[in-house]
Amino acid sequence: MPVTDLVNGVLSGKRRELARLISLIENDDGDASEALSQLYKHTGKAHIIGVTGPPGSGKSSLVTKLTAEFRKRKNTIGIVCVDPSSPFTGGAFLGDRIRMQEHYLDNEVYVRSMGTRGHLGGLARATSGAVRAIDAFGKDIIFVETVGAGQSEVEVIDIAHTVIVTDVPGSGDDIQAIKAGIMEIADIFVVNKMDISGADKKVTEINTMLDLDPREKAWRPPVMLTNSRSGEGVSELADKILEHLQFLNESGQMEQKGLKRSRDELYELMRYKLTQDLYQKLEGKPEYEAAIKKIAARKEDPYSLAERLIAEFLFSESR
Amino acid sequence: MSSSKKIRVLVAKPGLDGHDRGAKIVARALRDAGMEVIYTGLRQTPEMVVSAALDEGVHCIGLSILSGAHNALFPKIMELLKEEGIDDVLVVGGGIIPEDDISELKKAGISAIFGPGTPLDEIVEYIKANVKL
Ligand SMILES: Nc1nc2c(ncn2[C@@H]2O[C@H](COP(=O)(O)OP(=O)(O)O)[C@@H](O)[C@H]2O)c(=O)[nH]1
Ligand SMILES: [Mg+2]
């Protein structure tokens, strides 16, 4: 399918074209970057909400209930759920949709499941592109559910405006995990499964932990209680999410986030492109192979050769 | 680039029966064969199956049914897929389906029917050989 048709399909709200574009993004297809480049000016409108927390803490259930709540408020919704791919087979079992059945027939809700395909950090490499495609598609709110495996899952802050960290009542062990890594990224804490005993205790624990944070903060993450089966507390959470959005806009942090994101993204794309170029120019070149042999034989050192080869291959037009 | 392409399969259980053991076993086998398996849970209506297949951009839909409603549900799903203009997705079925019904289902567009006891490898190989990536 020509890229223009794909782009027009996405912009005119065709789910099938959106699904196709996300597949292209996942497969690293050249058409995907062309399409995203054309779609870029239509993005930046959605409120992107990350949901992270231990497996089984109720992320998918919570996203479902929040979706119902925001649908009541007439918002349209996109959902991206990330699950781990097996490092051995590359396969993945993507089961988050099981919790989302109530929205299957709602045309205003788009749900996409993704395997990490070897990417670390709680998201897939394609997640940010997929979110952008859904943004261009016109959804008001986009939820990103991360893998949920623990401390290193901080990548979600790069794409989300509001990050929700979920936890459940019970053993204090997981609070260690939260402390170690994901505490800093939470804009809102949710103690889900408030129907289970110990929920209030967990709220106190998290608040105590927040009290110990010495940094001066314009936004102190609130700790909310929810039951993602009955929906209790979800409307209050939705209000809090909107309050955070308002805070971002009024404090100027939204603008700063946008600038930071653009800076990081531009740099990352340039770095990626340079590496690709370098690789293509060096690959199989006799000078390159000879240099490697000289280094191994201690006839030249890698430090000076690196500089020389970069100057020679990357920045010379004649090559 | 094509090395990063993955077969995406929707495993769905249309109909009212409440058992998904078989479906889950197949789902696991497909995952272990390197596919991305989207599992949607029990009691799916044909509309739900097609909507999920559409959103997820799958190459294959695996339908499992035990309740005997396949003669109504499978063709309905094929019809809805056609309405959505989805003609490049491989649809296979499994579960308890009498021999006599198979040719009608195939006529409706179901590519293959795997009865109980079909070796999992056979299902994996069939999907690998017949999906359009
Ligand atoms: N008791 C109780 N169970 C819940 C609640 N929210 C989710 N669950 C259950 O917890 C399990 C895991 O939920 P899921 O949403 O899949 O968690 P995820 O792995 O974080 O996405 C499921 O069996 C849910 O039904 C809740 O508020 N209370
Ligand atoms: Mg989940």
Image: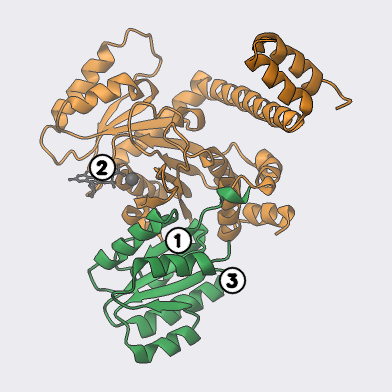
Q: Residue furthest bottom?
A: B100
Q: Which residue is mark 1?
A: B9
Left or right, A289 with respect to B71, comes to: right
Q: Amino acid at mark 2?
A: Gly
Chain letter of mark 1 equals B
- Residue B9's place in the image compared with A143, above or below, is below
Q: Which residue is mark 2?
A: A56
Q: Position of residue B95 (x, y in %)?
A: 31, 76
Q: Quadrant of residue A318?
A: top right
Crowdedness of circle 1 by 10 Å Cα count: few (<14), some, many (20+)? many
Quarter of the image with the N terminus of chain A is bottom right
Q: CA distance from mark 1 to mark 2?
A: 24 Å
Question: Chain B colour?
Answer: green
Q: Amino acid at mark 1?
A: Val
Q: Is residue A105 visible?
A: no
Tell me the element at label 2: loop
- Residue A47's place in the image compared with A248, above or below, is below
Q: Position of residue A180 (x, y in %)?
A: 31, 19
Residue at 50%, 60% in the rendered image = B58
* Cβ–Cβ under 8 Å for marks 1 and 2: no
Q: Residue furthest right?
A: A318
Among the chains pictured, the one given orange colouring is A
Q: Which residue is mark 3?
A: B85
Q: Is residue B27 visible?
A: yes
